[in-house]
Image (cartoon, rainbow, N blue to C red):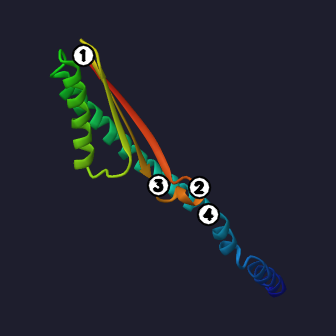
Amino acid sequence: MKDFRARVACRLSKLRRARRGGILSLTMITLPMLLGMAAIVVDLGILYIAKTKSETAAIFAAEAGAQRLPDIPSAETLAETTALTFLQDAGYVDSYSVSASATAVDISVTVEMGAQTLLADFIGIQRIDTSSTVTRP
């Protein structure tokens, strides 16, 4: 019985020595994958916020332009200025473009803008572009 316990203890000791550093190597393998997934989540959040802002600006601009619809040049101008004012007030100072086209019965506003990425820059993606189009009768 004593001999059996000694053999088991010896084998357990060898097993412990053979498994040293296993957690470190596992961590080193999975850490880049975890950081990569975190980068994707952060940058998708930035894209979602930019898309929401561009949609909101397009909606406000279309509503403002729709108020002056019989007068087409005035409606287009008001829609573009409303969208630009909203984007500037929201803190967007980088590139964005606003275009409005109107007919006698409806107005269509397109807001295109980009968002700077934070972590996807490591793989060469510095900017994510988004576009929103709203048409109001």
- CA separation in Å, label 3 and label 2: 10 Å
Position of residue 49 measured from the top left corner of the image (x, y, whole percent) = 36, 46
* Vertical side of 88 occupied by 105: above or below: above
Crowd tier of the residue under label 3, counting other residues whose Cα lies within 10 Å: few below 14, some 14–19, many 20 or above? many
- CA separation in Å, label 3 and label 4: 18 Å
Q: Which residue is mark 4?
A: 32
Q: Earlier in the sequence, mark 2 or mark 1?
A: 2
Choose between 110 and 81: the one closer to the eye.
81
Mark 2 and mark 1 in contact? Answer it, CB < 8 Å. no
* Camera-nearest label, 4 or 1: 1
Q: Which residue is mark 3?
A: 117
- CA separation in Å, label 4 and label 1: 50 Å
Looking at the rendered structure, the kind of residue marked 1 is Pro
Q: Which residue is mark 1?
A: 137
* Vertical side of 18 occupied by 51: above or below: above
Choose between 68 and 1: the one closer to the eye.
68
Mark 2 and mark 4 in contact? Answer it, CB < 8 Å. no
> Residue 124, labelled with which disc?
2
Which quadrant is the N terminus positioned in? bottom right
Looking at the rendered structure, the kind of residue marked 4 is Pro
